[in-house]
Image (spheres, helix red, strand yellow):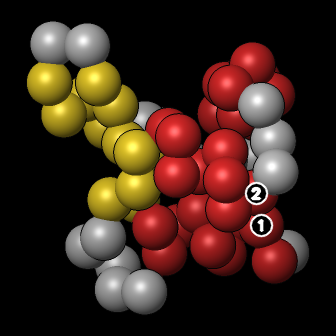
Amino acid sequence: MTSHQLLRLKQVEVKTGLKRSQIYLYMKEGIFPSSIKTGPASVALTGRLLFNCVID
């Protein structure tokens, strides 16, 4: 996984086993990196930053 890879929210749910509400709560608390707006109704998270958060 490279630092420039973006993961859609659904991919993050599958990789972490967390639900959307928990992911957003973790972003709010600073546990997960903030999302990046990729379109009018879509967001993504940076893969490497997310991976670092999950394994810590």
- Does 31 appear above or below 27? below
x, y percent for residue 13: 66, 45
x, y percent for residue 51: 63, 73
Which residue shows up at 34% across the image and 86% down it? 2
Question: Which residue is the site of mark 1?
Answer: 54
* Secondary element type, mark 2: helix
- Asked if one can make out residue 21 in the rendered structure from this viewpoint, the answer is yes
Question: Tags 2 and 1 in contact by the CB under 8 Å rule?
Answer: yes
Labels 2, 1: front one: 2
For residue 41, side relative to residue 55 (left or right): left
For residue 28, side relative to residue 7 (left or right): right
Dividing the picture into quarters, in which one does residue 16 lie?
Answer: bottom right
x, y percent for residue 8: 40, 45
Question: Which residue is the site of mark 2?
Answer: 16
Quadrant containing the N terminus is bottom left
Which residue shows up at 81% across the image and 41% down it? 18
Q: Residue furthest bottom?
A: 1
* Secondary element type, mark 1: helix
Q: Residue furthest top?
A: 40
Dividing the picture into quarters, in which one does residue 35 lie?
Answer: top left
Q: Amino acid at mark 2?
A: Thr
- Does 46 appear above or below 37? below
For residue 51, side relative to residue 40 (left or right): right
Q: Which residue is at the front of the view, 34 or 42? A: 42
Q: Amino acid at mark 1?
A: Val
- Does 14 appear above or below 41? below
- Asked if one can make out residue 30 in the rendered structure from this viewpoint, the answer is no
Alpha carbon distance from label 2 to label 1: 7 Å
Which residue shows up at 41% across the image and 55% down it? 7
